[in-house]
Structures are given as structure tokens and as C-alpha cells.
Amino acid sequence: MVLPETRSMQAAIVLAEELNFSRAAERMHVEQSTLSRLIAKLESDIGLQLFVRNHQNVAITEAGRRFVEEAHHSVLYAERAVLNSMAASHGAEEILNIGKSAYYADPYLVTTLQSIRLPLYPGLKIRIQSHYSHELARMVATGELDMALVTAIPDMPTLDFLTLVEMPFYVALSKANPLASLRELTLEDLHGVDWIILSPHVNPHALERLQKAAAEKMIAPAEMHHVMTIEEASAWILEYDGVAILPCNAAWQIALDGITMRPLAEKDINLSTRLATRVGNKSRLASEFIHAIGRRQRTLYSSPQ
């Protein structure tokens, strides 16, 4: 058996995702014949059939599925090795790859992470990557990230969590809306009005908790509108006089030009932001970093207000 090359593993990963030679070749920016040769050589090198194909269809075998799952990790580690080496050549002795939520991350928490200094690692460099919370949790579990700030993610057997802050949902609404006269809102206040919420793929667990809490209280919106971006939410608030139920950071981004925000006073659906790390991670650097964050948080929350 010959160990496969990284390029061949990348070809298998893309083909497994697309199950179509034409689309896979386009994604890899190669000719279809080149992709076919890469896959054929890979199968020859390892002595296994990874794909079953004809002129119309491609199917992945069980051996192929397992190979691609492991190859995905191998390619990621290889990429990290190159990036870390490049960083080291520019003076960074150690690197932490940390994820943050695209919509839910508190900028203050991100700044706190970036400000951590460790005496044992004076050359530490922190690389921040943005994604959705559930994807970040998966990336930490598979070792693609060292740790990540995740919000509204349920406990997982493969992850350890350090709770950093809990915040309510916020409701963004027009300043002309009668509900804006209230200091805080409840789900009962939102019954029968249009709800604007981020699409389920942004944070499916947060949306599920919100909908479950509303159903238990027999609260229902007049209409529910899913949006992809915060800017879309702003437009819908002004055009349809609806209310956008958002994490605090997202609500702040649109609380201007006729839009205000109020906390949603529902303790059962508070959004908990936690630092996720992989169970069994024995990295001394990661351990020192987590302890430093814990000390920073305790100092901040024990200081007189």
C-alpha cells in the first residue's frame, strides 16, 4: 500500500461531497479527466474501491465513506501545519486557532481572548475564525479548532465547556411600535405580531428553544419570517412593522435609524456563551489559556460596579 498524496485526498473529499465528476472538477479548478486520474491513482495506491461510477452517477462505497472522513482530518491538519509554520517564520512561537460565532459572539469576549498574555508563551499568536456556533462545536470536536466561543449549544460528550456570559434574546423593533414604550418584553407581548428571526442554519438549537418556549405558553406570531442577514431584518422591521428576535450583538447592529431594542425577559431561553474545548485535549498551552480566561472573568465579575 502506498500512502496517498494530499491532492488525491482533496479530490476524494470534494467528489464525496458533490457525487458528480463535473461539479467536483469545477470546484477543484481542474479538468474532469484530471480528477478521474487522481481518483483512479488513489484507489490503486491504497488498493480499495472508494467510488462506484458510471456516465451519469457517482456513489461512495462504505470504504470510501470511512476514508473520506479520516482524509478530511488529515488534510486539515496538513493545512494547519503549513499555516503554523508560516506564522512561526514571522515570529509566532505558538498558535491557538479559536472560533467565534458569526452572529452571536460578543465583541468584548473576542477582544478579551485576543488580549490574553501567557508568561510561558510570550510568542503566542491567536488566529480567529468565524462560523456558526454548531459548526464551531463540530470543528472543536474534530480538532480543526483548539477552542471556540459558542452560543446556545447543548452539552456534548466530546466537548468541555466554560461558561463566560449569559444574555437574553433581544427584540429589535420600530421606535414607533407601541411595544417600544415597554422597558422589556415577554413572549406574551409578542403574541400575534410578525416575528423576524435568523434562518435556522445560523443556530438551530437557539431557534428550537425559542419556538418550544413559545409553544408551551401558547404564543404564536402572526407570521414568521426567516432572514439570512441582519440588514434584511432591519428592512423587514421598517417595512412590515414586525419584531426581530435576535442575540444582543445582532440587535445592537440595527438599533438606529428608527429602530430600538428591548431585552426579552424569558430566563428559560437565555443565550449562554461558552468556551468549548475538546475532551481529552492535553495541550498545556490550551490549559494555560483557559485558566487565564477563567481568572479574567472572575476578576471582572467580582469587581465593584
Image: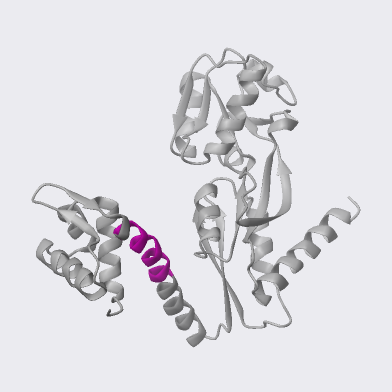
Task: Confirm whether residue 240 shows in the render.
Answer: yes
- Taking the magenta stretch, the answer to whether it contains residue 67 is yes
- Residue furthest toward the right? 304
**Side of 159 relative to 232 (left or right):** right
Give percent across and percent down for residue 154: 63, 44
Q: Residue visible at 18% across and 60% down? A: 25
Above or below, 122 relative to 260: below
Above or below, 23 relative to 213: below
Of residue 262 and residue 7, the one placed in the foreground of this image is 7
Of residue 178 and residue 215, the one placed in the foreground of this image is 215
Prevailing secondary structure of the magenta residues: helix
Count of numbered badges drawn on the protein: 0
Q: Residue visible at 55% across and 60% down? A: 140
Give percent across and percent down for residue 217: 67, 17
Give the magenta range.
64-76
Q: Residue visible at 55% across and 59% down? A: 141
Q: Residue visible at 31% across and 74% down? A: 6
**Side of 253 relative to 35 (left or right):** right
Quadrant location of the N terminus? bottom left
Give percent across and percent down for residue 10: 29, 66
**Quarter of image, res 279:** bottom right
Task: Confirm whether residue 174 shows in the render.
Answer: no
Looking at the picture, the colour scheme in use is: one colour
**Quarter of image, res 256:** top right
